[in-house]
Image (spheres, helix red, strand yellow):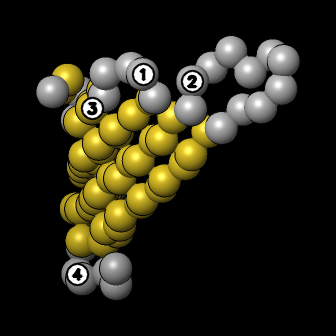
Amino acid sequence: QERRGDLSGSLGVQAQSRDLRLVGAEAFLPESSTDSWAAFAFEELRRGDLRWQLGLRWESLDVSAVGRPDRSFGGGWWD
């Protein structure tokens, strides 16, 4: 984000999807799928010699394993 007067910062998103499949004699973990996403913001305000900063991040994580209950996590809360 461009500096606008005394204010600057950035915004963004992140997403990821993974599948886990193990094979062989020591494959003791179940197959699983993990999906996650996040949104974040960071802003900085300059006033003379002072800098005020604020950062936020919201994140969600969903894990599904064969033969196990699904688990979802978001922003520190467990659904």
Residue hosting label 2 = 30
In the rendered structure, find residue 51 and report the number of the disc placed on it: none
In the rendered structure, find residue 67 and report the number of the disc placed on it: 1
Name the side, left or right, on which 23 lies relative to 37: right
Amino acid marked by disc 1: Gly
Q: CA distance from mark 3 to mark 4?
A: 41 Å
Residue at the spot 31% in from the left edge and 28% down from the top edge: 70
Q: For the residue labelled by badge 1, is the local secondary structure a helix, a strand or a loop?
A: loop
- Residue 41 lies, in percent from the top left, at 28, 59
- Residue 40 lies, in percent from the top left, at 30, 56
Residue hosting label 3 = 72
Q: CA distance from mark 3 to mark 1?
A: 16 Å
In the rendered structure, find residue 5 and report the number of the disc placed on it: 4
Q: CA distance from mark 2 to mark 1?
A: 8 Å
Q: Which is in the foreground here, disc 4 or disc 1?
A: 1
Earlier-in-chain disc, 3 versus 4:
4
